[in-house]
Every structure is written in structure tokens, then in C-alpha cells.
Image (cartoon, rainbow, N blue to C red):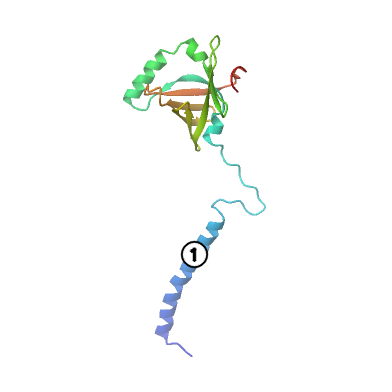
């Protein structure tokens, strides 16, 4: 059976979109099975970045305070002006289950916490019923906002090599 030229053109016009649709559907099916950026077979996957709450583990010292708006900036400036040697010597350690705060010559304060959320740059903790949000700037710097503090500024922490005292709950 032979098709007329106009029938052949109509058939080609119909088949092209169907082929394009089939190719897209096949491509989508491939993407469902294997996420974008997946390693080639036999090639190891690249390590993923640690979540914020993993980065936060360790000891930190207070570097100062930061505000995000005019009122918060004024509050941060006031807090920074009031920082003395005692405040600069304070250390804060996150262990994964406890937050420990101390400075030389003072008592250790240790409270249990629960991780409520851990994303790439954000760690949300519940410390004795109080919300603490930690924003990771990089592996050496974080910003801490405590809901209960209500000072309008966030505390800037820098990583420290100090180990927490071995007293109190671990």
C-alpha cells in the first residue's frame, strides 16, 4: 500500500512529537532511578557535607554579638561594649547531647539538649524547653540565637581548642 504524499507528511508531523515525548519520558524514568549527579557505576560517591549540628559539636568562645536590623544592631553594639575579660574567657561546648558553659574560676553549667532540626547551615536545639537556633557560617564560626535571651542580637562564636571540664554530667 502506498501513501499519498500529503498523508506521509501528516504521518511524519504526528510521529515527531510522539518520538520527542517518548524520549522525554524515557529520560524522566532514568532520572527517577538515579539522582542527578550520581556517580558513574564503579565510581565512589563524593562525601556529603556534614549537617550543622555535627559541625557545632566542639568548644566555642564568644567573639561578640551581631544584629540584623537597626534595633538588633544597637543591642549588639551595647552588648559588645559591655564585653569584658570574664565574658571573653567564657567557653561553650556542644557534645551532641549536652551544652556546657564555663569560664576560669567559675562553676560549670551543663544542660541536656535535643536536636529538633539539622540542615546544612542551621541547627535547632531544645535546651530545657528553650529554643536555640545556631546558624553555621563555616566550620570555625557560628551565630547563636537563644529564644529565651530575647536581646535582639545573635551571639557570634568562634571555635576553640579548649576541652570542657570533666566534672558534671557527661
Left of 152 or right of it: where is 132? right
Which residue occupies the extreme right position in the image?
Answer: 42
Left of 4 or right of it: where is 45? right
Q: Is residue 137 above or below residue 41?
A: above
Q: How crowded is mark 1: few (under 14 residues within 10 Å), some or many (20 or more)?
A: few
Name the residue rendered at 56%, 39% in the picture.
49
Name the residue rendered at 55%, 25% in the picture.
98
Which residue occupies the extreme top position in the image?
Answer: 105
Q: What element carries label 1?
A: helix
> x, y percentage for residue 73?
36, 23
Q: In which quarter of the image is residue 17?
A: bottom left
Say which of 59 and 110 sits in front. Answer: 110
Q: Quadrant of residue 102?
A: top right
Residue identified by numbered label 1: 25
Say which of 99 and 50 sits in front. Answer: 99
Q: Can the viewer see residue 14?
A: yes
Q: Can the viewer see residue 135?
A: no
Say which of 86 and 73 sits in front. Answer: 86
Name the residue rendered at 47%, 89% in the picture.
2
> x, y percentage for residue 61?
52, 19
> x, y percentage for residue 121?
49, 35
Which residue occupies the extreme left position in the image?
Answer: 70
Count of numbered tags: 1
> x, y percentage for residue 51?
54, 36
Quadrant where the C terminus is found in the figure: top right
Q: Is residue 99 above or below residue 34?
A: above
Say which of 16 and 147 sits in front. Answer: 147
Q: Is residue 43 above or below residue 91?
A: below
Amino acid at each position: 500500500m502506498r501513501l499519498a504524499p500529503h498523508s506521509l507528511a501528516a504521518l511524519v508531523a504526528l510521529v515527531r512529537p510522539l518520538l520527542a515525548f517518548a524520549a522525554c519520558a524515557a529520560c524522566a524514568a532514568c532520572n527517577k532511578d538515579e539522582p542527578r549527579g550520581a556517580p558513574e557505576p564503579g565510581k565512589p560517591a563524593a562525601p556529603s557535607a556534614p549537617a550543622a549540628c555535627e559541625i557545632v559539636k566542639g568548644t566555642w568562645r564568644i567573639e561578640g554579638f551581631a544584629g540584623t536590623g537597626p534595633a538588633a544592631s544597637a543591642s549588639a553594639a551595647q552588648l559588645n561594649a559591655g564585653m569584658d575579660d570574664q565574658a571573653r574567657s567564657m567557653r561553650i561546648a556542644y557534645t551532641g547531647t549536652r551544652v556546657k558553659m564555663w569560664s576560669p574560676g567559675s562553676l560549670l553549667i551543663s544542660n541536656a539538649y535535643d536536636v529538633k532540626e539539622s540542615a546544612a547551615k542551621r541547627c535547632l536545639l531544645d535546651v530545657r524547653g528553650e529554643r536555640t537556633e545556631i546558624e553555621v557560617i563555616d566550620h570555625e564560626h557560628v551565630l547563636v540565637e537563644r529564644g529565651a535571651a530575647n536581646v535582639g542580637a545573635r551571639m557570634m562564636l568562634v571555635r576553640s581548642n579548649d576541652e570542657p571540664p570533666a566534672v558534671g554530667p557527661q
